[in-house]
Amino acid sequence: MEFAEIYSFFNTTADKLEACWDIRILSNIANQRVPDFILSGRGSLLRADIHILWTQWFIESICDPEKFADSTQSYGHILVAVQKTVPIIFSGVSEEERKTLTKYISRLIDKEVQRRSPRKRSFISLEDKKLLWDIYGPEPRCWICGYEFTKWAENKFLGYGSDTEPPQHHFIDYMTLHGLSQRDISVEVDHAIPFSKGGKEEDNLRLACGWCNSHKSDRISIYDVAIKPRIVEHPKLGKQSVPHPFWIVRLLSVRRRCEFEDGCDKTVDNAQLTVVHKHPEGAMNPTNLRVICSEHDPIGSTRLVSRKVAEQMRQ
Ligand SMILES: [Zn+2]
Ligand SMILES: [Zn+2]
């Protein structure tokens, strides 16, 4: 840890947060290098997310995917809409280059439209589901959090014995509330790379639990989920902040292993993982989260609350 670097950063940036509406101060802040220590070892995640988000915003400023989600309009309509704006935005490029850009941008917008409209996703046949189950079997886990699917979930996914009652988790992790709803513990097919048009590449499909899958596809913007952690009333711990599920899923899917400081061999391939705070007194924002297995979980059974309490926390 470099004291001088951190102190100077606090002085020039943290101290000036209230003035971030002033363009001169803003450019000063923009020119500061954020010390790695402050990025809590997640620097590449932060930078990659910002690059992805701003690129996405740029693409969507050309053609709004929301106008095509859940509509009957097809790829052709997107292409026409993009064709209108591309010459205005990229005025300095040749006709040929414009065509290339139009096709490329239309394809990206179409992918986003697919992502936002579940009914437009290509249907996954029972045969494909069985195939996937075999690939990931014999006891498949959620690829994101490592949750081991129950027999009930397997049967439901593969279309057998839908008359059995879903298992009820009597104790629920208060930070995630995973297991509260039936969807949470169901098997779903997750598209690793958001869907190429009409394609059905097996490599692109993975099994996820409903909890991870729903929060993964929830995403509108990383900025929307960064502002405030939620506050719940824990029966033993009192007022606790809990992280936005998006960040839990984001971290789990990127790390996929227990981050216990002395090392641990638990990964989502052999255990269910969750997150815990680095500093218990701090807010549960993305810089204060680490992925943990049950063995190294510092809060242990305190994490689990009864179903009834979890229900109240959801509200
Ligand atoms: Zn999961
Ligand atoms: Zn561990």
Image: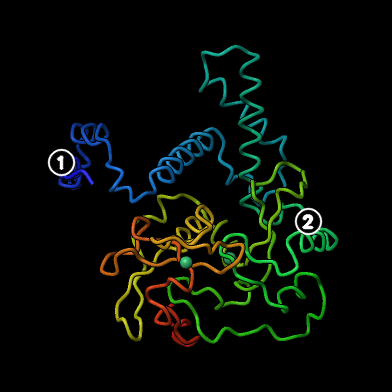
Q: How many marks?
A: 2
Cα–Cα gap, marks 2 and 1: 57 Å
Q: Position of residue 121 (x, y in %)?
A: 72, 52
2 or 1: mark nearer the eye: 1
Disc 2 Cβ-to-ligand 1 distance below 8 Å:
no
Disc 1 Cβ-to-ligand 2 distance below 8 Å:
no
Indicate which disc residue 123 carries: 2
Q: Residue at x 40, y 67 (%)?
A: 276
Q: Residue furthest right?
A: 127
The correct choice, above or below, for 274 with respect to 43 in the image is below
Viewer-proximal residue among 41 and 174: 41
Viewer-proximal residue among 154 and 24: 154
Q: Given the image, on which type of amino acid does mark 2 rest? A: Phe
The correct choice, above or below, for 62 with respect to 131 in the image is above
The correct choice, above or below, for 35 with respect to 177 in the image is above
Residue 48 sits in which quadrant? top left
Q: Given the image, on which type of amino acid does mark 1 rest? A: Ala
Task: Check disc 2: other Cα within 10 Å, few if <14, some if 14-19, many if 20+.
Answer: few
Residue 65 sits in which quadrant? top right
Task: Check disc 1: other Cα within 10 Å, few if <14, some if 14-19, many if 20+.
Answer: few
Indicate which disc residue 4 carries: 1
The correct choice, above or below, for 207 with respect to 168 in the image is above
State left or right for residue 302 relative to residue 187.
left
Q: Residue at x 65, y 66 (%)?
A: 141
Badge 2 vs badge 1, beta-carbon distance below 8 Å: no
The quarter of the image holding the C terminus is: bottom left
Check disc 2 and report its element: helix, strand or loop: loop
Q: Residue at x 40, y 61 (%)?
A: 262
Q: Residue at x 67, y 52 (%)?
A: 191
